[in-house]
Amino acid sequence: MKRIKISFGGEITIAKIIDEEKKMETTYTKLDITKNQRNNLEKLYENSPKTLELVKFDMHDYFITSDEYRYIYPNSKIIKDVVKGEEPECGTQACFLGRGPLCGILANNNEDWEDYCERQFGIIRCSSAWFWLFGHNWKYVDNTLEGARKRLRIALDKGVPDAQEQ
């Protein structure tokens, strides 16, 4: 944040501080991903709205069912059944990353979500890009698919905002 010097007898207003902050330019770090991984992110962006008809959206969990809180792998039978058109259990929900397999971005057998994300999207767990796109704390800030898609569009077009800008 830009520091503003105040001398005795000077006056500063909140409006002046806000004007100074607006002048600051946001910096971005481009995604370091392959063409295939970029194509998969574009596919997630384009197709994820259709997945709302299949399962609820919640940034907190990759993919869970309502009957029990359990870890569901990206290549699990439950996800394959939903993709085939079978009705999921009431209360089934998935985050933005959890929608990848529903969008046709397939997982390998016994691959966990972190490995799936790194292989298919080039995003490493706990990286700035991970927190910007898939971080579970978005549940408390913007727990919407629209918000997740907007963050992805920014990442694809400009890059990930530097940490102090997020």
Image (tube, helix red, strand yellow):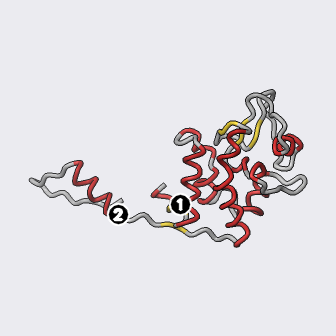
Q: Residue 55 at what x, y percent from top left?
A: 72, 38
Assign the N terminus to one quadrant of the image.
bottom left
Q: Nearer the viewer, residue 119 or 102?
A: 102
Q: Residue 45 at what x, y percent from top left?
A: 64, 55
Image point (63%, 44%), residue name? 136
- Give the labeled residue for mark 2: 24
Q: Nearer the viewer, residue 102 or 85?
A: 85
Q: Residue 68 at what x, y percent from top left?
A: 80, 29
SS assignment at label 2: loop
Q: Which mark is residue 85?
A: none
Residue 16 falls left or right of residue 29: left
Question: Relative to residue 158, is residue 64 depicted above or below?
Answer: above
Between the C-alphas of marks 1 and 2, the distance is: 18 Å
- Which is closer to the viewer, label 1 or label 2? 1
Few, some or many residues within 10 Å of mark 2 (<14, 14–19, 20+): few
Q: Residue 141 at what x, y percent from top left?
A: 52, 41
Q: Amino acid at mark 2?
A: Met
Q: Which mark is residue 154?
A: 1
Image point (59%, 59%), residue name? 128
Question: Relative to residue 111, is residue 39 depicted above or below?
Answer: below
Q: Are marks 1 and 2 in contact (CB under 8 Å)?
A: no
Image point (83%, 43%), residue name? 79
Q: Nearer the viewer, residue 21 or 53?
A: 53
Few, some or many residues within 10 Å of mark 1 (<14, 14–19, 20+): some
Q: Give the mark count.
A: 2
Question: Relative to residue 70, is residue 108 depicted above or below?
Answer: below
Q: Nearer the viewer, residue 157 or 18?
A: 157
Closer to the N terminus: mark 1 or mark 2? 2
Q: Amino acid at mark 1?
A: Ile
Image point (18%, 52%), residue name? 12
SS assignment at label 1: helix
Residue 19 falls left or right of residue 38: left
